[in-house]
Image (cartoon, rainbow, N blue to C red):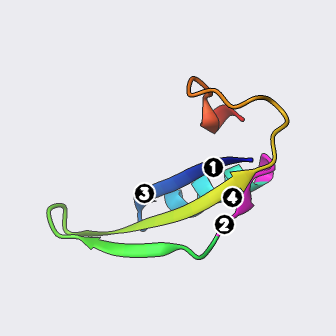
Amino acid sequence: MIYRLLTADDTSAFCHKVSEALSKGWELYGDPSYAYDAQNNVMRCAQAVVKHDHAPYSPDMKLGQQ
């Protein structure tokens, strides 16, 4: 299993990022998180996703391309 944490500002772009990962076979892992970024005056989102991958793990994997 491989793991990614998707993060972005709280906009529709974040939803598209998560939807794209789901369309590529990733699965939601836990609930989304939201936090206020005071330095940039925006809300930030995070969503963990996992994927069952049969390839051996390597730190050189490009997780966004999996």
Pointer 1 residue: 3
- Placement of the C terminus among the 4 image quadrants: top right
- As helix, strand or loop, the secondary structure at mark 1 comes to strand
Type of amino acid under label 3: Ala
Of callouts 1 and 4, which one flags the residue occurring earlier in the amino acid sequence? 1
Residue with the most extreme right position: 54
Residue 49 magenta: no
Of callouts 4 and 3, which one flags the residue occurring earlier in the amino acid sequence? 3
How far apart, in angstroms, are the residues tagged by discs 4 and 3? 13 Å
How packed mark 3 is, by other alpha carbons closer than 10 Å (few <14, some 14-19, many 20 or more), is some
Residue 3 rendering spot, x and y as whole percentages:
63, 49
Q: Are marks 1 and 4 in contact (CB under 8 Å)?
A: no
Q: Are marks 1 and 2 in contact (CB under 8 Å)?
A: yes
How far apart, in angstroms, are the residues tagged by discs 1 and 2? 9 Å
Of callouts 2 and 4, which one flags the residue occurring earlier in the amino acid sequence? 4
Residue 38 rendering spot, x and y as whole percentages:
17, 69
Which quadrant holds residue 29? bottom right
Using residue 47 as the reference point, say whether residue 44 is left or right of it. left
- As helix, strand or loop, the secondary structure at mark 4 comes to helix
Residue 51 rendering spot, x and y as whole percentages:
75, 49
Type of amino acid under label 1: Tyr
Pointer 3 residue: 8
Type of amino acid under label 4: Ser
Pointer 2 residue: 29
